[in-house]
Image (cartoon, grey):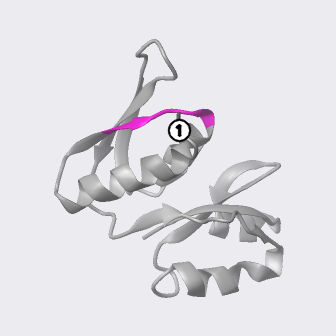
Amino acid sequence: MRHDTLADVMSAIKNAERIGKKECITPASNLVREVLKVIQEKGYIGTFEFIDDGKSGKFRIELKNKINDCGIIKPRYPVKIDGFEKFEKRFLPAKDVGFLILTNPKGVMTHQDAKKQKIGGRLLAYIF
């Protein structure tokens, strides 16, 4: 039984990137699908596909070897519109390098998109 599927996915991606694999297989969930879409839009991973194994399923993710580090943010801190800078300094190496992924009533998005839309949310992960 998995307790945090998103954490398993992020560590699988990080480990596969570090050893130079071209793809990795990870557990699937709706939250993971939305996070992978955001990462794919930013160009850090290639395509990903759902594999139905009769249980909860898996994702096959094509890697581009562009990820230096990624991980989840626990606890899932709530962040307001003006509070992103504090977490950028904490989780990202430099200004405009990488992004934070957050969830809010409008869906899963990057912190840059949330700033543009002037909304906050709860932090899920970081990637650079």
Residue 19 image offset from top left, x and y in percent? 17, 58
43 in magenta: no
Q: Which residue is situated farthest in the front direction here?
A: 1
For image coordinates 78% across by 64% down, the residue present is 117
For image coordinates 53% across by 33% down, the residue present is 1
Residue 25 image offset from top left, x and y in percent? 33, 36
* Residue 29: quarter of image: top right
Would you say 95 lies left or right of 10 here?
right
For image coordinates 60% across by 81% down, the residue present is 88
Which residue is labeled 1 in the image?
2
Residue 7 image offset from top left, x and y in percent? 50, 52
Residue 68 image offset from top left, x and y in percent? 33, 70
Q: Is residue 87 above or below residue 119?
A: below
Would you say 83 lies left or right of 43 here?
right
Q: Could you tell me if residue 40 is visible in this image?
A: no
123 and 8: which one is in front? 8
Q: Which residue is situated farthest in the left direction here?
A: 20
Q: What amino acid is labelled 1 in the image?
A: Arg
Specify the segment rendered in magenta: 25-30
- Across the whole image, how many numbered discs are drawn on residues? 1
Q: Could you tell me if residue 122 is visible in this image?
A: yes
For image coordinates 46% across by 23% down, the residue present is 57
Q: Secondary structure at mark 1?
A: loop
Q: Is residue 60 above or below residue 44?
A: above
Q: Which residue is situated farthest in the top direction here?
A: 54
Q: Label 1: few (<14), some or many (≥20) within 10 Å? A: few
77 and 85: which one is in front? 77
